[in-house]
Image: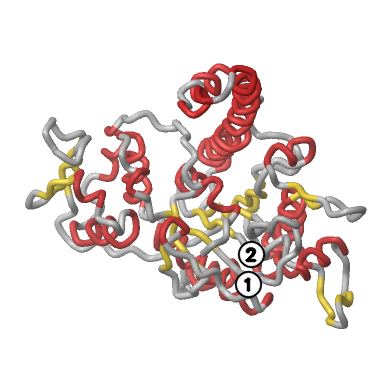
């Protein structure tokens, strides 16, 4: 694509949330047919085919191994359901909104901050939280329970960058390239690299893992919606761009290097067997349709590491993002608008407002209300379509 999407910054974060306790899959024994299991493995979770190298199929089960050579005893044996198991999108009554990033004093560290001249600074966390606060009452008015992972600019995690110094030093010390530097340059480069690494472990790994634990252990929703804005790579002059697109992610499409660890594969199979894919794909398609109509944005055209196109709406992709992987149940990750697009940037500068305002003789609603209203429309359409049918007796 020649462009770097902010969403992929969290795709391969190493987050050791699950120990490799394969007995966690016991509750999923005989809940999926072999046909469905193979379909999900080969078309969604590992379309490259790499995951099949860790599997050996028997008549009514599949053996999962620790290495492609299958030389040691299997880690786990999953027994298939004997008959067909129909799966449909499940009803949603409780939704968690996850406004992305920390913001505030942490925004520059997260690299979710930019400012041009004397203009108002742009913090993505501010944009995301503004949308969440507009969206929440709309969904509640429709009878849904809506919870937020955060409603301020404080980290969810109780860790701080300095807590990861030893881990960062151990990681950076393995960089052979630094040993080629002159001694004084090496000391300076080491110090800077350690700082960046410990910050990364804080705001990406620890923060995302803490939000996932909060959702899984405390909030326990039927659906999680991660709210973000996107951006594309600046040129050397940091000029605003004309391009502006729409992107949504559901879980899947593990790269080959993302399934090499036992804990990686355990999490993959945990997500596969919870069977949340049908729901999150239906939700993503519904929201994408509403956002497409409201914004007029074309879809991102992604390929390879950027994602696997699989929705009815061409803006919906599967990718192994940390939030989608670690949060239990259906998760939809939204990335509409490029913040450094010329018009989007001007709309951000206008803030939130009622009615319309003009930019280059074109009338625009509040960027935040356009976003929130479209997500509400898509979510409520899905909720209505999947609501249980009430009988006369009820």
User: Looking at the image, which residue is at 72% across and 63% down?
Assistant: 138
Is 59 positioned to the left or the right of 158 in the image?
A: left
The residue under the point 48% across, 27% down is 175
**Residue position marked by numbered label 2 in the rendering:** 336
Image side of residue 356 versus residue 216, left or right: right
Residue 372 at x, y percent in the picture: 71, 64
Q: In terms of depth relative to the viewer, which is nearer, 232 or 123?
A: 232
Left or right of 282? Residue 356 is right
The structure residue drawn at horizontal position 63% and vertical position 52%, both measured from the top left corner, is 97
Mark nearer the N terminus (1 vs 2): 1
* Residue positioned most to the bottom: 361
Residue 282, position in %: x, y? Answer: 46, 67
Q: Quadrant of residue 251?
A: bottom left
Task: Determine the image quadrant of residue 266.
Answer: top left
User: Pointer 1: what residue?
Assistant: 291
Measure the alpha-carbon separation of dots 1 and 2.
8 Å
Give the percent coordinates (x, y) of residue 323: 52, 46
Between marks 1 and 2 in the image, the one whose residue lies nearer the viewer: 2
In this picture, residue 302 sits left or right of residue 37: right
Please report contact status of discs 1 and 2: CB closer than 8 Å, yes or no. Answer: yes
Question: In what element is the residue under mark 1?
Answer: helix
Q: Residue at x 87, y 82 (%)?
A: 361
SS at circle 2: loop
Residue 308 seen from this side: yes
Report the colour scheme: secondary structure
Residue 75 image offset from top left, x and y in percent = 20, 33
Residue located farthest toward the left when viewing the structure as drawn? 59
């Amino acid at each position: 694509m020649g462009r770097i999407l902010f969403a992929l910054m969290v795709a391969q974060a190493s987050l050791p949330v699950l120990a490799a306790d394969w007995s966690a899959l016991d509750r999923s024994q005989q809940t999926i047919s072999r046909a469905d299991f193979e379909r999900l493995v080969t078309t969604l979770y590992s379309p490259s085919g790499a995951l099949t190298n860790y599997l050996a199929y028997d008549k009514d089960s599949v053996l999962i191994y620790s290495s492609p050579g299958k030389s040691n005893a299997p880690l786990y044996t999953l027994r298939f359901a004997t008959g067909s198991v129909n799966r449909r999108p499940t009803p949603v009554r409780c939704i968690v909104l996850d406004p992305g990033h920390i913001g505030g004093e942490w925004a520059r560290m997260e690299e979710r901050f930019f400012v041009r001249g004397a203009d108002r600074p742009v913090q993505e966390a501010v944009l995301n939280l503004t949308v969440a606060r507009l969206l929440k009452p709309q969904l509640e008015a429709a009878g849904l329970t809506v919870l937020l992972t955060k409603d301020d600019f404080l980290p969810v995690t109780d860790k701080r960058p300095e807590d990861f110094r030893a881990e960062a030093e151990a990681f950076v010390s393995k960089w052979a390239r630094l040993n080629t530097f002159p001694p004084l340059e090496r000391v300076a480069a080491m110090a800077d690299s350690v700082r960046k690494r410990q910050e990364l472990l804080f705001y990406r790994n620890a923060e995302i893992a803490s939000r996932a634990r909060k959702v899984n252990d405390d909030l326990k929703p039927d659906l999680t919606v991660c709210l973000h804005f996107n951006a594309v790579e600046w040129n050397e002059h940091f000029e605003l761009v004309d391009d502006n697109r729409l992107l949504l992610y559901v879980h899947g499409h593990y790269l080959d290097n993302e399934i090499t660890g036992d804990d990686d594969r355990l999490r993959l199979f945990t997500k596969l067997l919870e069977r949340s894919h049908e729901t999150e794909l239906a939700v993503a398609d519904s929201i994408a349709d509403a956002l497409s109509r409201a914004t007029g944005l074309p879809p991102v055209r992604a390929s390879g590491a950027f994602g696997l196109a699989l929705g009815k709406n061409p803006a919906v992709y599967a990718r192994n993002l940390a939030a989608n992987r670690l949060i239990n149940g259906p998760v939809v990750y939204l990335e509409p608008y490029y913040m450094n697009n010329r018009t989007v940037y001007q709309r951000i500068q206008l803030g939130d407002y009622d009615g319309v305002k003009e930019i280059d003789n074109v009338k625009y609603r509040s960027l935040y209300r356009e976003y929130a209203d479209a997500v509400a429309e898509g979510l409520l359409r899905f909720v209505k379509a999947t609501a249980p049918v009430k009988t006369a007796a009820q």
